[in-house]
Amino acid sequence: MTPADVAFVDPGRGRGPADRLGLAVQLCTLPWLGFVPDEVRAAPPVAVGRLAQRLRVDAAVLAGYGERPQTRTDHLRLVTDYLSWKPAGSDGVAVKELEEFLLGRAMEHDSPTTLFNLACEYLIAARTVRPGAVTLTQMVASARTTATALTHQKVAHLLTEQVMADLDLLLRFDVGLGMTRLAWLTAPAVEATAASVKTAIEKLKFLRAMDAHVLDLSMLAAERRRFLATVGRRSTYQALERHEEQRRYPILLTLVAQSAVDQLDEVVTLFDQAVSARESRAKVKTDAALAERGKRGEVRQALLEMILPVLADPGIPDDQVGGLLRGQIGMGVLREAAATGWPALPRDHGRLSAMDTSYTYLRQFTPDVLAAIDFNGGPGTAELMQAVAMLAELNRTGGRKVPYSAPDGFVPARFRDYLAAARGEHGNREPPPPLGTGPGVRRRHHVVVGRAAVPGTRQVVDRQGDERPLRRSGPVGLHPRVRPAFDVRDEGHRPDHPRGPLRPGRLPRQRHRPADPGARDGHARGHADQLRPVRPGR
């Protein structure tokens, strides 16, 4: 209590100790609780003791306070005037403002407890004495009823006979599914498999057949839509059937509208996870193949260490080099090394070719995904979008091969070898790629590079030629800036080299070997001190 509060409680006009202490309890209780209980004498003893010490009275005198009910009422009026609070009359402006506040909050929250607590906080902030608990509870119930009627009124123009019939169909048991359509729609996918992707696409098509993806519920607050959709997911079909129409239909309407967005998110996420799992499997296979190649490389390195000293030794005549090497190493070892060969690795170390065994699995759902989802590209992704559209059209018409005229400007340099092989630029080492397996458009997540937004969803497909998770963009319908297509030149790759780009891990071959032994010897003398020659007979 401040000195002004003490002066207000004890004005020196003959107010007794019990009245002073009771008035002090009301003065401290009103700003804290927003009201003063009828039983002022039931205040916590600890708080009463501190007030009594501040007023220099005995705490026990509070037991005699309020023997006359009019005393408590008069003191409460004095406290409200002193603190500039106003009572909540039955038909005053404060009550009207409270009703408007509760209606606005009821359009966002439907929990009675939440609305009751919000009303108490509002009254304290407005310096209004809280009415009785029963009265406030009745006001909360009235606000909830009004909010339900107002919600139905705002969406009434959307509830045509066909729409209401479709919504009622959600609550009926479907023999083919073994459950209601409502339970089928709200059941999330357990794992990212081909069957899960297909089921998610079927749900998306079902919702689009209801025009759920074009429903405009912007007349309802976002919190109200989220709340009604949550009620629809958590409620059983029996509970929804027991609701009145003005409550049941808005719940189902917001549920299908929100499910259309969520289901599109789920399709994109499941598709990304399913394909990423195959990419991870291909990475494991590639790593194992590279490890095996490294083991075989040790054997070839050992042979090279035996061959180079002989070739670099100027004291060994040229006509004895072949016989010396065949005698030391052995014809069996040389023939085995020659038969094994050492094929050059592509720039991605064979990562893309390791996906070949997965295309049968991917084709189970990839055409359906491309047919169900539209992609929007940003600056620099024109060829990317053209390639995706071409692949979707081939799937629709039953085409089996990607045309050679397909755009490939978005393909990274490390995948260019596959394009060259498929087009026969390197001796037709590979046949033309079938649908969905061409290096240029094998899969939109693996080779297609850039950033593409899916209209109507919160997902953004962001791939730079490796595995990256999906990123969430801003609100639905607002697509962030998209980056230009990836530069086809990798770091360290020099396409302007006179001999053309070098493949990583492959040494340039010496196309001309001098016939003059002296030239060979002279070339070797510069490195003779760095090699340990192998003398005949060693």
Image (cartoon, helix red, strand yellow):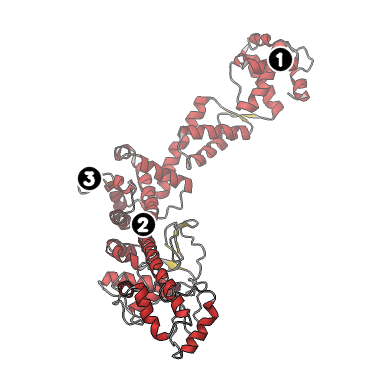
Q: Quadrant of the N terminus?
A: top right
Select label 2 or label 1 by which is in front.
Answer: 2
Front-most of residues 304 and 242: 304
Mark toward the start of the polypeptide (1 vs 3): 1
Residue 277, numbered circle: 2
- Left or right relative to 268: residue 490: right
Q: Is residue 112 above or below residue 523?
A: above
Front-most of residues 421 and 249: 421
Cα–Cα gap, marks 2 and 3: 30 Å
Q: Quadrant of residue 145?
A: top left
- Left or right relative to 70: residue 419: left
Name which residue lies at 78% across and 23% down: 3
Q: Residue furthest left?
A: 175
Disc 3 target residue: 178
Query: Around disc 3, counting alpha carbons within 10 Å, would you say few (fewer than 14), some (14 to 19), or many (20 or more)?
Result: few
Q: Quadrant of the C terminus?
A: bottom left
Residue 122 percent coordinates (x, y): 58, 35
Are the residues at dot 2 and dot 3 in contact (C-beta closer than 8 Å)?
no
